[in-house]
Amino acid sequence: MKIPSLLFLSLTGLIFLGCDYDTAAPNTFEYHAHIHAPDAETKHFGDTLHIEVEFESHTAMNVDHVNVRIYEAVSGTEVYNKPDNAHLHGVGSFYVFEDELVLLTANGFMDQTQYVLAARVWTHANGLEEAIEEVSFRVTE
């Protein structure tokens, strides 16, 4: 009786040892979007809005896609969406997006309105390893 029990235990142990349990984590990008400008202070018509967003991977993976958009907080009406091509090629693990935009009605801005600047970074597949940072600001005359 001891021999079949030992054989059974030995075979069971070999089965568990033979299984390939992948304990290694898949590539993680740990993306972050850091909005340096604008801040949450109230802006005024005619002001030039400086936009500066730092996108990075804390695991040294490539920054693949970025997007910066500004939309009206209540209605969601978009007034800004850049860059024209979100896919970046070979920028490495760090990318700074900068732009300037004059706050005018002609550019879609309205008086006494709250806006949101949303900065988004993601990998090859849309939404995969995505990170979003937002800042909200008001525009007045």
Image (cartoon, rainbow, N blue to C red):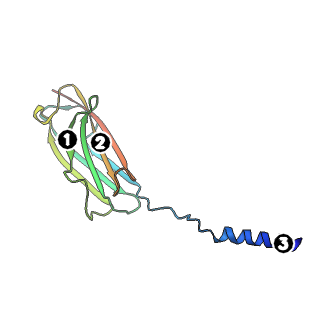
Q: Residues within 10 Å of mark 3 (few under 14, many from 20)?
A: few
Q: Is residue 101 above or below residue 90?
A: above
Residue farthest along the left direction in this orientation: 106
What residue sits right under mark 2 in the picture?
118
Which tag is nearer the camera, tag 2 or tag 3?
3
Label 2 sits on a secondary structure element that is: strand
Identify the image quadrant of residue 79: top left
Q: Position of residue 140 (x, y in %)?
A: 19, 27
Q: Amino acid at mark 3?
A: Pro
What residue sits right under mark 1 in the picture?
80
Check contact, mark 2 vs mark 3: CB within 8 A: no
Give the distance between the C-alpha atoms of the residues marked 1 and 2, in whole angstroms: 10 Å
Identify the image quadrant of residue 46: top left
Mark 1 or mark 3: name the one nearer the start of the chain: 3
Label 3 sits on a secondary structure element that is: helix
* Quadrant assignment for the C terminus: top left
Give the distance between the C-alpha atoms of the residues marked 2 and 3, in whole angstroms: 66 Å
**Seen in the image, is 21 located left or right of residue 120?**
right
**Seen in the image, is 13 located left or right of residue 104?**
right
Mark 2 or mark 3: name the one nearer the start of the chain: 3
Q: Amino acid at mark 2?
A: Ala
